[in-house]
Image (tube, rainbow, N blue to C red):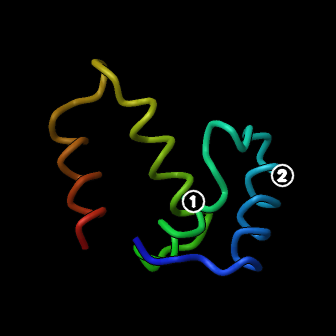
Amino acid sequence: MAGATPPEVRKARAFLRSKGINTREIPPRKFASSAKELDRGFRDLLKFIMRLMSGGQGQSRQRQEVIYSKRNQ
């Protein structure tokens, strides 16, 4: 996983807190590293995580394939 610099971690922490997300649920260092590795912004990464978390049994197979294909781009 690509390492995040301390300023990136601080930005990630501030972003997560501004969205009301507990930093114990999503650690800022991992969040910042993931955004950097995927070359995505914090907003896009959070949308992706929320889609995955809300998917569950009600999510169609077709929708899951779309999400996973976007992740692998």
Instruction: Determine whether 62 is above or below 59 in the image.
Output: below
Q: Is residue 29 left or right of residue 33?
A: right
Asked whether 30 or 50 is in front, the reply is 30
Q: Which numbered dot is residue 31?
A: 1
Q: Is residue 69 left or right of residue 3?
A: left
Say which amino acid is labelled 2.
Ser
Instruction: Determine whether 30 is above or below 73 in the image.
Output: above
Q: Quadrant of residue 32?
A: bottom right
Q: How many marks?
A: 2
Say which amino acid is labelled 1.
Phe
Asked whether 73 or 66 is in front, the reply is 73
Q: Quadrant of residue 72?
A: bottom left
Residue under circle 2? 18
The residue under the point 77% across, 70% down is 11
The residue under the point 70% across, 76% down is 8
Q: Which element type, helix, strand or loop, lies under badge 1? A: helix
In the image, residue 63 lies at what x, y percent?
25, 42
